[in-house]
Image (cartoon, coloured by chain):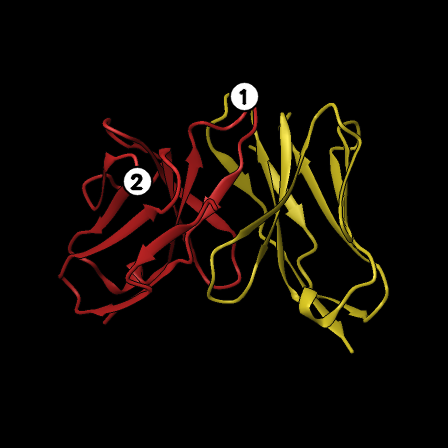
């Protein structure tokens, strides 16, 4: 069955450093991959989408890579700030433009 | 733009009662809406996909007679939890996709969620 794995343990990073989150998947060939941010008690907020034919995508301090051979995506936040503390979810979607499948998320904490 | 609202944001009800949750796209037309359930520290689990004017498609293991979904307009979908029991207590989140989006672009806009507690 399709499986998405994200770091199950919380990631603690010193402010100003780069945070790197990992998303691995198996038994799936997604057409695209998305990253979302979720704060406690809130719905997810879309951050970035990267398609299967793209290697890297950037948006301000965020960078996402997508390696379809390794079946892995890396999500980077450079110059991290305490306000970046949240749970980050990766999600995979197929070419049919229907449902997407979410990973369980990684909780990121940026300490001052 | 692309704002999705949910109402109520939280609800407490007695076991056996029914609860209706509304999901609205405020500034775009949502041809497709999705309903998710999320338990603490777990992932979002898709319950059903609803397309405007047609019956919802439920995921395996989700009882369609218990979780009634209506998507009567391009801006409103409702989820009714019928005869709710304590095990239905969860965080319910809807999302909407802009039907006018680019081909192959599948960004979903999420609502703020509804916390359901069944006593």
Residue B5, given in percent of the width and then of the height, sits at 36, 53
Q: Residues within 10 Å of mark 1 (few under 14, many from 20)?
A: few
The residue most toward the bottom is: A112
Relative to A67, residue A23 above or below: below
Residue at x-position 53% and y-position 37%: B107
Chain in yellow, by letter, is A
Pointer 1 indicates a residue of which chain?
B
Q: Are marks 2 and 1 on the same chain?
A: yes
Can you tell which quarter of the image residue B50 is in? top left
Relative to B51, residue B103 above or below: above
Earlier-in-chain disc, 2 versus 1:
2
Residue position marked by numbered label 2 in the rendering: B75
Chain in red, by letter, is B
**Structural distance between the alpha carbons of marks 2 and 1:** 21 Å
Relative to B84, residue B59 above or below: above
Residue A63, given in percent of the width and then of the height, sits at 78, 46
Q: Residues within 10 Å of mark 2 (few under 14, many from 20)?
A: many
Residue at x-position 13% and y-position 61%: B17
Number of the label disc, if any, that sits on residue B103 = 1
Pointer 2 indicates a residue of which chain?
B
């Amino acid at each position: 069955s399709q499986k998405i794995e994200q770091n199950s343990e919380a990631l603690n990073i010193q402010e100003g450093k780069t945070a790197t989150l990992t998303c691995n998947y198996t038994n799936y060939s997604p057409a695209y991959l998305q990253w979302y941010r979720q704060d406690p008690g809130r719905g997810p907020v879309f951050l970035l989408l990267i398609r299967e034919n793209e290697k890297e995508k950037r948006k301000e301090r965020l960078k996402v890579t997508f390696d379809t051979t390794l079946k892995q995506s890396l999500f980077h936040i450079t110059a991290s700030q305490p306000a970046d503390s949240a749970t980050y979810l990766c999600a995979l979607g197929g070419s049919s433009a229907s449902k997407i499948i979410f990973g369980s998320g990684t909780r990121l904490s940026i300490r001052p | 733009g692309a704002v999705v609202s949910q109402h109520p944001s939280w609800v407490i009800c007695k076991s056996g009662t029914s609860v209706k949750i509304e999901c609205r796209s405020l500034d775009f037309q949502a041809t497709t809406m999705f309903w998710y359930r999320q338990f603490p520290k777990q992932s979002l689990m898709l319950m059903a996909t609803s397309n405007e004017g047609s019956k919802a498609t439920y995921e395996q293991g989700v009882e369609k007679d218990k979780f009634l979904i209506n998507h009567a307009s391009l801006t409103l979908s409702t989820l009714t939890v019928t005869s709710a029991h304590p095990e239905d207590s969860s965080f319910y989140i809807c999302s909407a996709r802009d039907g006018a989006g680019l081909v192959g672009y599948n960004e979903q806009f999420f609502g703020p969620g509804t916390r359901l507690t069944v006593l």
